[in-house]
Each structure stands twice: as C-alpha cells, then as structure tokens.
C-alpha cells in the first residue's frame, strides 16, 4: 500500500491524501472507497486481526486497483484554513458537495492511470450519501456499493443535531468544525458494541486505529494544548440533519447502475428501517445483504471478510460493468 497526495482543484494549495493498493497484474476493475463522518480512510487499511487482510489488500488480491481518499479536513489530507480559527466561526465545513469535488479530483487521476477501466464506487456511512449523490450527478460509476448506508430516516440518535425550536435547522451550537477527544471518537464504536460480544473487535486493531487518527492532528493538539484531540469538519452534521428530516441529499430512484445495499445486523447508525426505505426507492438492479453479528464498523470486526466477499461477489456478478 502507498499513499499519494494530489492537488485539490476546489481549494489550492490543499492536498488530498489517497491510499493506493494495486494488484500484481493489470487491474480489471477499479474500486474507489469513501469513508464516513469521523473515521478517515485508515479504516480500510487496517486488518480486523493481525493475520487477516485489510479491505484494501483483499480487493487488490482479487485483481482490483483499490483507492481510498481522505476528504479535505480529515485524516492525512489538508485541513481548510478556517479550521485554524479557534472561534470556529462560519458555516459547517466540508459538506457532501465539497467531498464530491475531492472525489472528482481523485477520479481524474485514476482515469489517467487506468484509462478505460470501469470504476466501482463503495461508500461507507456518510460516504454512502456522497456516493449516491455522485452516482446521480455523473456517468462514471459502473457499480455502486452503499455500505452501512444512511439515507432518509428520523434516527432518534441524531435528534441533538437539530435546533430545539425548529428541527429543520441545525443546532446553533454546531460550529464550522468540532474538536473530538479520543474518548469521543472511540465511544462511537463502543456504543455499537454495547451488549455484544467483545471478541468481535480485536484490541490491537482498535488501538492502531485510535493511534493513527490521533497522529493526524498532533501538531495542532500540542500547540493548542488539546492533547489526544483532533479537529473534524461539521459539514457532515448538516448533511445528517437532512437525513434526519427525511430530506435525502440524493434521490435514490435516479441511480441507474447496479447497486448493493450492505450493512451489519446490529448497525445502529444505518438502521434496518432506513435500508428498507432505500431499497424501496431504488429502481435500478439492486441487492440487499445484512451481515450477521456485525455493527456499523463490521469491516473492522470478526465478520470483516464477509463484507469483503459480499462486495467482490457483487462486482463479479453478471450485472454489466
């Protein structure tokens, strides 16, 4: 696996970090994977256990050139200059349209490297919303995988995003970016596992994930005395509020490429009812699969390879690329 940096056309001189894992032979398909709201692309580059493949390496072993980016403001990519403002003034940063612009830059690079090779787009969590938006606003997506998707459902856990006097408006306490502690972002996965078998998650994988994320903003954390914290854009929260108000950021009925809806059985972010509604709205060739004994972060749990296999089976299916 290698990491390359490409320029952002939306905001020079920002750079977009892209993880790349290539197959040994010429790629027959490209797989481009988009991350979600909090955890950057490192989640696709960690194994669920020391003797298991990462999502990137699994896909490359199947013959796919596999790419995953950090959206601006996340992981190893540049942070908008507005995120240096301690007052956090301004509108929420990096919404789905900004993320889609980053994807456009990456796709241009991919198409230059692999001319004529079909691209399968995989979007995880918030990345599924971005993927759906892209699939309805471009013609390069040959197949679409909505992994742990959020689409259009009043998830009670998201009520705090709304203004208490008007649920269509964002909570005024939400600024342009947020500061998240290690406890905050590891708590997301902890809550998913509450009441489940702790062996689903390997402690070494969990520690590697947290250590990497913390390292991506360590200079700022030391300078501002926010040890163990990172900055995260809040544009995703504006997008999530639309999902909460059942005003999705894309119209699933307009997706034309074959689509797989894939989630964990115990996913509390991508709720079964939301996936049901998404499937009912899709008019393209479609499949749905819920992986048993898995949460929202199933791609890093004991069932990880079941997710990977479901994606590769879908790619290899008779649906035309």
Image (tube, rainbow, N blue to C red):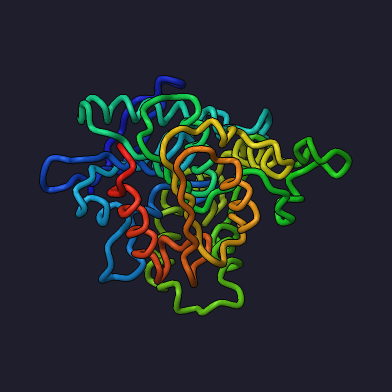
**For residue 287, above or below residue 133:** below
Q: Position of residue 295 (x, y in %)?
A: 52, 65
Residue at left 55%, top 33%? 96
Q: Which residue is drawn at the image coordinates 23% and 32% (left, top)?
A: 117
Asked whether residue 218 appears in the rendered view, the answer is no
Q: Quadrant of residue 161?
A: top right
Q: Residue at x 52, y 60 (%)?
A: 296
> Where does the image place residue 198, in percent across and percent down from the top left?
50, 78
The residue at the far left in this view is: 25
The C terminus lies in quadrant: top left
Instruction: Determine the residue positioned at 64% across, 33% down.
Output: 92
* 155 or 221: nearer the viewer: 155
Left or right, 69 with respect to 73, comes to left
Image height of 320 relative to 180, above or below: above
Q: Where on the picture, by quarter, is residue 4?
A: top left
> How many numbered marks appear?
0
Q: Position of residue 23 (x, y in %)?
A: 17, 47
Residue 157 in the image: above or below residue 18: below
Q: Is residue 161 visible?
A: yes
Image spot of residue 184 (x, y percent): 60, 59
Front residue of 122 and 320: 320
């Amino acid at each position: 696996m290698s990491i390359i940096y490409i320029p952002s056309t939306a905001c020079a001189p920002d750079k977009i970090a892209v993880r790349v894992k290539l197959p040994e032979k010429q790629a027959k398909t490209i797989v481009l994977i988009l991350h979600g709201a909090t955890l950057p692309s490192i989640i696709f580059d960690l194994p669920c256990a020391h003797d298991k493949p990462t999502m990137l390496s699994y896909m490359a072993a199947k013959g796919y050139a596999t790419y995953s980016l950090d959206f601006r403001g996340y992981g190893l990519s540049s942070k908008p200059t507005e995120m240096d403002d301690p007052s956090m003034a301004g509108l929420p940063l990096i919404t789905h349209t900004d993320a889609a612009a980053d994807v456009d830059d990456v796709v241009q690079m991919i198409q230059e490297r692999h001319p004529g090779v079909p691209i399968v787009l995989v979007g995880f969590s918030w990345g599924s919303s971005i993927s759906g938006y892209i699939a309805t606003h471009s013609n390069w997506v040959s197949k679409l995988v909505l992994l742990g998707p959020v689409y259009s459902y009043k998830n009670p856990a998201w009520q705090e995003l709304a203004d208490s006097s008007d649920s269509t408006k964002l909570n005024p306490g939400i600024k342009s970016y947020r500061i998240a502690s290690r406890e905050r972002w590891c708590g997301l996965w902890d809550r998913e596992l509450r009441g489940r078998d702790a062996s689903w998650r390997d402690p070494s994988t969990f520690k590697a994930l947290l250590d990497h994320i913390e390292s991506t903003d360590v200079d700022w954390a030391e300078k501002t005395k926010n040890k163990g914290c990172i900055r995260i854009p809040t544009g995703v929260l504006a997008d999530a509020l639309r999902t909460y108000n059942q005003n999705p950021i894309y119209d699933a009925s307009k997706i034309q490429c074959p689509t797989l809806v894939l989630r964990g059985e115990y996913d509390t972010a991508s709720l079964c009812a939301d996936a049901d509604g998404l499937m009912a709205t899709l008019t393209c060739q479609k499949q749905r699969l819920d992986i048993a004994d898995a949460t929202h972060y199933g791609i890093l749990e004991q069932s990880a390879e079941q997710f990977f296999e479901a994606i590769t089976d879908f790619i290899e299916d008779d649906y035309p690329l």
